[in-house]
Image (cartoon, helix red, strand yellow):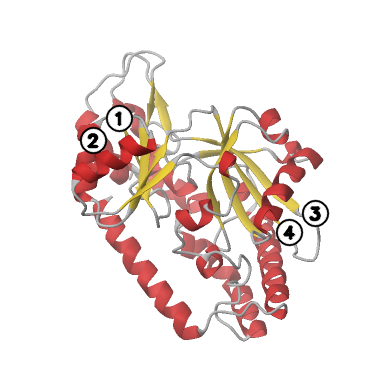
Amino acid sequence: MSVRNFFKKIVSWELWNFNVLYAPISPVWLWYCLRSRSFWFFTPSNPTIAFGGFEGEGKKEMYEQLPSEVIPLTIYIRNGIPFAAVLAQLEQSGLRYPFVVKPDVGMKGILFRVIENEQQLKKYHDRMPVEYIAQEKIDYPVEVSVFYYRYPWEKKGVVSGFIHKELLQVKGDGKRTLQELIEQHPRARYRLQEMEHRHQHRYNRVLPDQEIFYLSYAGNHNRGARFTNLHPEIDESLLQVFDGLSHYNESFFYGRYDIKTRSIEDLKAGKNFIVLEFNGAGAEPNHIYDCNMPLGTAYKVILQHWKALYTISRYNYQQGIPYWSFRKGKAFLRASRKHFKILEQFD
């Protein structure tokens, strides 16, 4: 990283390491632990998701609690089974190339891949250390995130954040190589080690004029996706859609929906959209990013969401949904961290 990029990363808080960014407000989180007399005060927030959806939950348990018409066609594949059995699952399911693969328990876009053919699938399957999912590739043109929470005693919730996502990508000009495009990209240039790991074998390729090359298919902030704040689009129609999802199983009270849709208008009308992910208690209000928000304002937004998370969790606890014990939560978190460390080694 150049000296210029290094100092730009220091002054731009959106590029800071997660732990550095959250350190100044971490005493507030600790205060909620003390008030609840539980390190895992958030676990009743989404009672039917492991650990409240804070970390380590599987996508299967999330998909099973949403209406079938809003989730992608998905199959679950155990690692280590014969590849012939994988092909049989594909044939039986009707899933066709290209499709998406990713760990059932994953995060931050780790081991997220688009599979174009049988050879790529075999390579992925042979090196996958954990159970994973194969899922239809949703080609709706608009990808968004919606942060929603609802207090359990109320019928209506709150859409607190709404953003559009643009995957990390470069556009060719018929002159520059992929490496040059990456090094001059406003976000990719801060991720040169990752880019080299993923795309070095293509670095000398000159992209044709106007050709789009996706550097990552994961629409995450930590994978370089660009966010555009859509807060003015939040209205009663949008809220009704997510109130409906929250009431579907009466158990999703707090979190962020990652969605692909044909258009914002269709999403508001409750049609032509697919839920890719639901991130529970551990979800960031990612509408703080990429909108020139001052750091102090970003902290205010985060703290408002933490207060809602505490309030929801405390109410559900008082209704008989227990906090996880310290031992149970510690063991789950340790197993989750071990799991992700393994994933990172194979990414």
Cβ atoms at labels 3 and 4 below 8 Å apart: yes
Image mark count: 4
Question: Which type of secondary structure does the marked residue at label 2 adopt?
Answer: helix
Residue 83: where, in percent of width, then height? 20, 44
Q: Residue at x 30, y 26 (%)?
A: 178
Q: Which residue is mark 3?
A: 156
Kind of residue sitting beneath label 1: Glu
N-term-proximal mark, 1 vs 4: 1
Q: Which residue is mark 1?
A: 116
Front in this rendered view, residue 166 or 185: 166
Residue 184: where, in percent of width, then height? 38, 31
Q: Residue at x 23, y 35 (%)?
A: 120
- Report the Cα–Cα distance between label 2 and label 3: 45 Å
Cβ atoms at labels 1 and 4 below 8 Å apart: no
Kind of residue sitting beneath label 2: Gln
- Report the Cα–Cα distance between label 1 and label 2: 7 Å
